[in-house]
Amino acid sequence: MTRQEIARTALRAAIELRRRANVPLEDPICVYDFAGTLDVEVRFVGGSSFAGMFAKGMDAVFVPSERPAGRRAFTCAHELAHWRFGHGERVETLDFDRDDRDVPEEILANHFAGFLLMPNRALTAEAGARGIDFRSLTAHEAYRLASQLGVGYDTLIKHLRWSERLIDQERMDQLQLRTPKDLRRELLGQDARGHLVIADKQWRKVAIDLEVGDHAIVPHGASLNGDSARVLRECQHGMVIEAIRPGISQTFDGKDWAHMVRVSRKQFVGRAAFRHLEDDDDNDTTLDN
């Protein structure tokens, strides 16, 4: 198949899988929860050289726990493609920045992951709700969209440019001059380690997922219930909260905005379904059960 045919095949499969899971194309997803609705088990695995695995005989995918949050989500969607297309069992030991131009199954899986996590209708819905014009997309706006869709900043930009053609090369080049670290510093008003999620007033459908040590910015005036996160301070963009222990809290504004804040251990290893438990007695980190 040509690259265009591969992309079309990936798009059709992503749409079909969302329909099978009864998830509208407009909606953002948590890919780990999404996999669970398809009876595909997701496990997080440690190791600095491990880049993902699909275990065909187990209907399971394995995701590297030491990668950034957006990369983990994309890896899960990529491995879910291997499951969807019935590819043979494989272990990814190289980074996704490697050259996959001559590996059709990997090209297919990358396209599938992008279309599953960032379908056109979700992109346009989220941008429209925030008053974002892709032709003048700013770095802060791109970061907000990436947060809502659960993907990395650079992953979103590349998808907008090459898969959806919603931004031109000049806009892509300008956006790529910024790094997520720089943007986190600007949005928080200070340096911060870990991941940052921008959960604005338009946030919908998915929980705010963090690891211990991560931060989120929620709307001004929002309250927080639970002990897995704490309020740090107000900043220009909203209220800053910090994830401090595994568990589930809730943030709400007393009106019509309320969302779960789910916190897992830093670089959690084990079954994805258990990642927010306050203790890990039930976690099974082996690959052969």
Image (cartoon, rainbow, N blue to C red):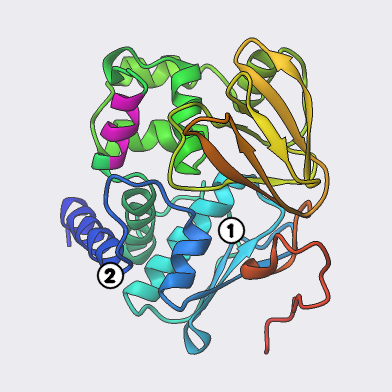
Q: Is residue 254 visible?
A: yes
Within 10 Å of disc 2 (Cα), the crowding (few <14, some 14-19, many 20+) is: few
- Residue 216 placement (x, y as % from top left): 66, 32
Look at the image and tell me in which quarter the C terminus lies.
bottom right
Relative to 101, is 233 on the left or the right?
Answer: right
Residue 215 appears in the figure: no
Residue type indicated by callout 2:
Arg
What residue is disc 1 on? Answer: 94
Q: Residue furthest front?
A: 254
* Residue ID at (63%, 20%): 221
Q: Closest to the observer: 216 or 140?
A: 216
Q: Residue at x 67, y 30 (%)?
A: 223
The image position of residue 111, as x and y in percent, is 32, 53
| Residue depicted at 28% across the width and 34% down the height | 125
| Quarter containing the N terminus | bottom left
Where does the image place residue 269, in percent across and percent down from the top left? 74, 65
Image: 166 above or below 272: above
Q: Nearer the viewer, residue 268 or 181?
A: 268
Residue 273 in the magenta stretch? The answer is no
To which quarter of the image does residue 277 belong?
A: bottom right
Residue name at image x 67 percent, y 22 percent: 239
The magenta segment: 122-129
Judging depth in this view, the residue of 200 and 253 nearest the camera is: 253
As measured in the structure, the alpha-carbon distance from the residue carrying label 2 to the one carrying label 1 is: 31 Å
For the residues labelled 2 and 1, say whether their Cβ atoms are less than 8 Å apart: no
Label drawn at residue 20: 2
Q: Nearer the viewer, mark 2 or mark 1?
A: 2
- Earlier residue among tags 2 and 1: 2
- Describe the element under mark 1 as helix, strand or loop: loop
